[in-house]
Image: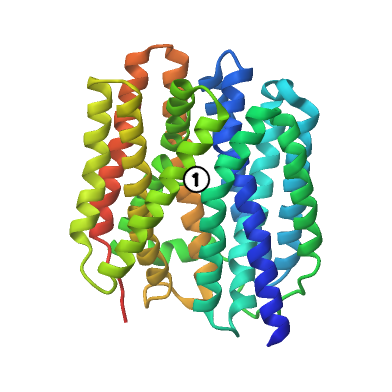
Amino acid sequence: MKNKKIEADIIIAINAMKKIMILFLGPFLTAYFIKTSKESLIDLSLYYVFSYIILAIGSFLVASIIKNKFRIGMFRIGVILNFFYIMFIIILKEKIVDHLGLMSILYGISSSAYWFSYNLFSINKIENIKRTEYTVKSKIVSSTIGIICPILLGTIITATNYELTAVIILFISIIQIILSFMLTPDKENELPKFNLKNTWNNLKDNNQIRKTSLVEFLIGMNVSDGALEILMTILIFDSFKTNMNLGIITSITTILSMIFVHIYGKVYKNKDDKIIITISSILPVISVLVLLMWKNNITIIIYNVCYVIFTSLLTLTREIRLFNLADSYIVDKNNQTEFFAIREGILNCGRIFGYLMLLFAGLSGNQFILNIVMVLLTLSILAMGFNIIKIDKFEK
C-alpha cells in the first residue's frame, strides 16, 4: 500500500510538470509565434492542423499497442519526446516558424504517447488506493499551478526572453523523465485483441454515442486546445502586448473558473444541471456579439472571462457524462480502450476543423472573415451545450 501511494504521488508530480509545460507551450508559445512570424495566424493554424493530424493517427497506433501491455514504456517515450520538443525550441529560437513540420510531428507523437498511455496506466496504478484522495490531491496541485505559473512564466519571459524560460522548462522535463523511471510497470491485461472497427460498428447506432461524439467534435473546435482557445490568446496578446499581462489575465480567469466549478460541485451535485448548462452555453455568444459591436480592452476581458468560466463548467458537465457513459452498459468493459481511441479521433477531427477555419481566415487577410470565424467558433459552444443536455448522466 505504501509503495502504491508513493507511485500515486509520483504520477501527480509528473502530471503537474506536464501542466507547467502545457501552460508554457500553450498561450506563451502562441505569443512567441505572434512576435516572430509575419503571418502568425497562418503559421499557427498550419502548425496545429498538422500537429493534430499526427496526434489523431498516433492515438490509434498507441491504443493498439498499449491495450494489454507496454503502457509504462509508451508513457516514458511520451515524456522523453516532450524533452526533445522543448530542446528544439531552444535550438531553433526565431527560426521555429521555418520548421513547423518537425515541431508538429514531435508535438503530435509526444502527446499521443503521453496522454493515452497516462490515462490507462494511471487507472491501474491508482486502483488499490482511495481514488477520491488521489483525485482531490491532483486537482489541488493542478489548480495551484494553473493560478501561479501563468503569472510566473509571463514575468520570467518579460524579464528575460522565451528561450531562457524554455531552458527552465527543459530542466523540469529532465526531472519528469527521472520520475517516470521510478514507476514500476503495471500488470499486463488479458483483454481481447484491439479491434477498432468492431467496436465502432457496435456503438455507432446508439443515440447516446452519437450525441457524445458530436459534443467531442465541438469541444475540439472551441475548448480542448481548440482554435477558439488560441484565438482568445491572440486577442489578449494583441490588446495587452506583454507576456506578463497575458500571464496575469490567464491566472485571474483560472481563479474565477475554479470558484464557479466549486460552486457547481456544491450546488448541482446529483441534481439536474440543465439550467447551468443553458446559461453557460448562451453567455459566451452574447459576450462575443458585444465584443464585435464595441471592441475595446474591457469587452475583450469580458469575452475572455465568459469563455473561460462557462466553458470550464461545460467541460466539467461533459466529462461527468463521458466517463459515466464509458462505465455504463453501453460500452463493453473489454472495449474501453477502443472507445477512448474513437473519442480521441473525433476530438482531434474537431480541432483540425477549427484550425482549418482559422487558416482560411488567415489566408483571406480579411478582418471581417476572421470575425465571422470567431462568431462561428463561439456558436459551437452553444451547440455543444445543447447537446450535452441531451446526454444521459448514467448516475447509479
Image-quadrant location for residue 98:
top right
Q: Is residue 22 visible?
A: yes
* Residue 58 horizontal/vertical position (percent): 63, 49
Is 136 located above or below residue 307 in the figure?
below
Display colour scheme? rainbow
Q: Horizontal placement of 300 versus 94: left or right?
A: left
Total number of numbered labels? Answer: 1
The residue shown at (21%, 35%) is 286
In the foreground, 20 or 333: 20
Is 119 located above or below residue 243 in the figure?
below
Label 1: how many Cα within 10 Å (few below 14, some 14–19, many 20+) = many
Q: Residue furthest left?
A: 275
The residue shown at (77%, 63%) is 179
* Residue 342 horizontal/vertical position (percent): 49, 57
The residue shown at (36%, 62%) is 262
* Residue 154 horizontal/vertical position (percent): 59, 35
The residue shown at (74%, 25%) is 93
Which residue is identified by label 1?
348
Image-quadrant location for residue 62:
bottom right
Tell me the quadrant of the picture where the C terminus can be found.
bottom left
Q: Horizontal placement of 205 versus 132: left or right?
A: left
Q: Is residue 58 visible?
A: no
Q: Horizontal placement of 350 versus 151: left or right?
A: left
Tell me the quadrant of the picture where the N terminus can be found.
bottom right
Q: Horizontal placement of 27 versus 274: left or right?
A: right
* Residue 354 horizontal/vertical position (percent): 43, 34
Amino acid at circle 1: Asn
**SS for dot 1:** helix
